[in-house]
Image (cartoon, grey):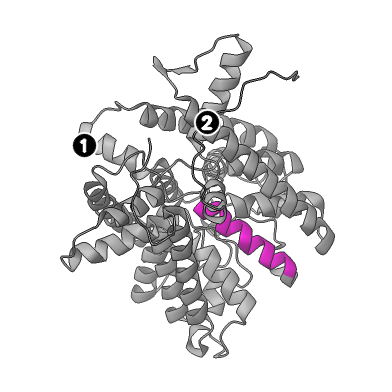
Amino acid sequence: MQLPKIDLGGLSPAQILSAGYLIVIFFGTVLLMLPFATVDGQGLDLIDALFTATSATCVTGLVVVTTGTTFTVFGQLVIMLLIQIGGLGIMTMSTAFALIMGRKITLRQRLIIQEDLNQLGISGLLRLIQYILAFTFTIEGLGALLFFIRLARKYPLKKAIFYSIFHSVSAFNNAGFDLFGNSLESFVGDPLIILTAIILIVLGGLGFTVLVELFDKRKLHSLHAKMVIVTTVILLLVGFIVIFALEYSNSNTMANLSLGEKIMASFFLSVTPRTAGFNTVPTGALRESTLFFIMILMFIGASPGSTGGGIKTTTIGTIVFTLWTTVRGKKDVEIFKRRLDEGIIFKSLTILMLSLLLVLVVTLILSVTEESSLVEILFETVSAFGTVGLSTGITPTLSKIGRMLIIITMFTGRVGPLTLAVAMSESKKKPQFHYPKEKIMVG
């Protein structure tokens, strides 16, 4: 669908959107550098503050300092606010404030909202935002209530309330920040905490468009929603089976757990690479085969228009169906009795190649600048790109160059490699002619 030609002050929606996230990261960095943001009264240095602000805004969860012990309540509130803004999207939050103030939303703003929410058109965007806000605060509120039931037994009242809200926001927005110091490892056998976190992560990763369709129509009608649900279920089930098989006898992770705890831990480890970043078993103790499989899940990530990152479920679904169509010698890519537009196929392939290129280049540079193993570096890079937050433990040991590269990777993963590429490219007029076609030999 072609966007109408609107004067955006010489900037494309992608450029304005990218600038919006950079502005939020800038203010987050400044706030985390304030003396009263950290327990020691010194504030974070520039690189660490920038890394933390980027990780929170890009809902990643990679940390160079321990969130629960380094930051004061003020610092933790800043991080939670950055997570909320990053998860919902810059334009969703700004539009919400505009609606509260009674201001009209211009066509220019709607185009930027469309880019931010990854929507196909601009019709119904304000209604979608109203749904997004209602869903978000309702789901986060219920999640916080369920967390509180358990945390109230472990912490004082005020602390239990704050911890419940913080982790509900972090889980639904697929951020992975925690205040416990060891993620959710202490709750590996707690069904209430684990199942609540799983539900929050999955709902946040489905995408608001799918949630609205489920709520509004009680039945999936669009091809997009069907692809999201089917791909998500397949990834979760395959992930659970593979991880359960690989880690069942690993003495460093699941060997000493009961069967029920192994099932919960395996399923949680299948869910959390969908860009959530929480863990119930030590990530660094996982077998290399498991780490490699989790990298695949992290690279795919969540769904379009969600709080998660990665290349997205519909992208991998489109590519798989395209490959299957080509192998069978058919011309049209057909899914659920619908034919995919060629533009979607080209866009999916472009996203895949740009993402692979980014991950490979960053991994190559980090393998030179860092002392960690190639598996650990690749895992860190994919985790940053997918805005996941899982780490084998090398994040605090990264050099300044390494931290800056991960910052860039997290930002690219949140904004989207294609969106960022469009934002950085020069706008050119479309040619009024086409060159003659010619075939080349491939394969």
Residue sitting nearer the eye, 421 or 152:
421
| Circle nearer the viewer, 2 or 1 | 2
Determine which residue is flagged by label 1.
Answer: 216
Is 412 magenta? The answer is: yes
Asked if one can make out residue 377 in the rendered structure from this viewpoint, the answer is: yes
Determine which residue is flagged by label 2.
Answer: 433
Q: Which mark is residue 232?
A: none
Q: Position of residue 33 (x, y in %)?
A: 54, 83
Q: Earlier in the sequence, mark 2 or mark 1?
A: 1
Vertical placement of residue 331 versus 158, above or below: above
Vertical placement of residue 289 versus 367, above or below: above
Q: Position of residue 426 (x, y in %)?
A: 55, 53
Q: Image point 54% across, 66% down: which residue?
A: 54
Query: Where does the C terminus fall, quadrant-wise?
Result: top right
Query: Where does the N terminus fall, quadrant-wise?
Result: top left
Is 152 magenta? The answer is: no
Q: Position of residue 221 (x, y in %)?
A: 29, 26
Given the current orientation, which residue lies at the most extreme left position?
A: 102
Asked if one can make out residue 370 in the rendered structure from this viewpoint, the answer is: no
SS category of the residue bearing label 1: helix
Residue sitting nearer the eye, 90 or 139:
90
Residue range in magenta is 401-416
In the rendered structure, which amino acid carries the disc numbered 2?
Phe
Where residue 310 sits, quadrant-wise, is top right
Total count of labels: 2
